[in-house]
Image (cartoon, rainbow, N blue to C red):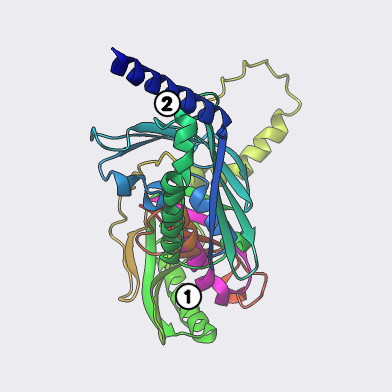
Amino acid sequence: MTRFLELLISIVIVIVLFVVVGVFLPSQRDVQNAMETNHPVRQVYDTINGFKRFGDWHPLRQHDPRVRFTLSGPPTGVGATLDYASTDPLGVGKGRWELVESEQDMRVKFNTVNEDYGTDKVNEFTLDNKGKTVEIQWKYSVDYGWNLLGRYAGLYVNRTVGDDIKRGLGNLVGLLATMPNFDYKVLGEIVYADLPIENILYISTTADRNITAVDDAMSLALTDIEAAIKANNLEAAGAPRLITTNFGAEKYEFDIAIPVRRPDPAAAAADGDESADADADADAADAPVEPVAAAPAPAAAPAAMPGTPVVPVAPPALTDLKLPANVLSGQSYGGRALMTDYTGHPATLPLVRDMLRSFAAAHGETVTDRAFEEYLTGMSETAADEAKFKVYWPIQ
C-alpha cells in the first residue's frame, strides 16, 4: 500500500510539474528563414501568388508523394485555395492553405489549417528587392492558446516546421533557377487569349539574324502573299503575322502569314446597292412613315469563365486556289495563348517572346507550338521605334 501511495504521489507531482511548466511556456511561436535568388521580384511573386506551382516547391510532396491537391477559388491572388489530403495513413493528413493577403512584388500571406497542434497558423512570404537579388523571407506563426500539449510541441517547432521552411525555400530557389530569367514586368499587361483557327496564306523563309535581312525577307514574302490574295479574289481577315520557327545563332527561320477569307457575297451586294438605296431614301424622305415595332436585340453569348479554354472550330479549308510555288495555304494555330501588346523596335521582339516564356513558367503554364507577332504597324514601317505589335505564345 505504501508503494502504491508513493507511485500515486509521484504521478501527481509529475502532472503538477507538467502543468506548471506548460503554463509558463509561450502560447505563440514564430519561426522564419530567408534565402536569395537572382530572378526578378515579379517572377518570384507570381510563382508564390497562387498554387499552380505549389507542389513544385513546397515540401508536402517530399513527405508524401501520394498527397492529393484540390485547387479552388481564383487562379491567383486573394481567395485562391488549396486543399490537400493524403491517401497514406502515415502521410501528411489533410489540411488547407488559403491566400488571404497579397501585395504585388512585396508579400503574400496564407492562412493554414492542418492536423498539427495550434490555431491561427499563418505562413507569410516577404520579398525584399535588393536590385540584383531578391531576398525571400518565409515566416510561420502559430497560436497554441491554453493547449499545454501544443505549448510543449512548440518547443520543437524550429526542428519540424523550421526544417520544412528551409527545405521549401531551397526548393523555391531551385525552381526559379529552372525558369527563363527575364523581367516581364516592363511589358505591362499579359493576358490569356483564346485564338480562333483561321485560313491563312503563308511563306516559309530564312534570313540572316539581323534586322535589315529579316525586314527584306518579310517585305518580299508579304508582296507575294498580297499578290496571291488578289489573284484568288480573297481578302485579308487580319494583320500580317511573323511566326518564329527557329531563332538560331546566325539564321532566323520564320513564316510570314496573312489570315484570309472569301468575300461575303451578301456584303458585296449590299455595297452595290448603296447608291440605289441612297436615291430611294431621298425620295422617301418626304413620305409619311408608319411606326414599326423594334426587333428584339439578340441575346448576348455567355462569356467564358476566366481560365476556361474555348475549343476552337476550324473553318472550311480554302480550295481551288491558284498559288505560286512559294505561297502555301493552311490554317493557323487555334487555342489558348499568352498575349501582350508591345510598342517598340522589332529588334526587341525576341526579348518580348522570352519574357512571355518567363511569365508562363511562373504561372505554371507550358508554352507550345510557335510564338508569333501580329504587325499592327505596316511591315514597311517597322524600323520605327514606335511600331505596334500583338505578341502571342501558345500554351497547353
* Residue at horizontal 28 percent and vertical 43 percent from the top: 64
Q: Is residue 334 visible?
A: no
User: Where 299 falls versus 178 (above or below)?
Assistant: above
Ranked by sequence position, the earlier of labels 1 and 2 is 2
* Residue at horizontal 33 percent and vertical 69 percent from the top: 323
Q: In this view, does 377 lie to the left or right of 255?
A: right
Q: Is residue 248 visible?
A: yes
Q: Which amino acid does label 1 sit on?
A: Thr
Q: Which amino acid does label 2 sit on?
A: Val
Return the residue at label 1. 223
Front residue of this view, candidates 93 and 368:
93
Asked if the stretch drawn in magenta spans residue 27, the answer is: no
List the single residue furthest toward the right: 286
* Residue at horizontal 40 percent and vertical 42 percent from the top: 309
Return the residue at label 2. 14
**Secondary element at image label 1:** helix
Location of residue 327 in the rendering, given as x and y in whole percent from the top left corner? 35, 72
Q: Quadrant of residue 319?
A: bottom left
Front residue of this view, candidates 117 and 382:
117
**Where does the magenta region start and end?**
334-357
Location of residue 228 in the rendering, given as x and y in whole percent from the top left corner? 40, 69
Q: Is residue 344 left or right of residue 123?
A: right
The disc at residue 68 is none
Location of residue 218 in the rendering, given as x and y in whole percent from the top left corner? 48, 77
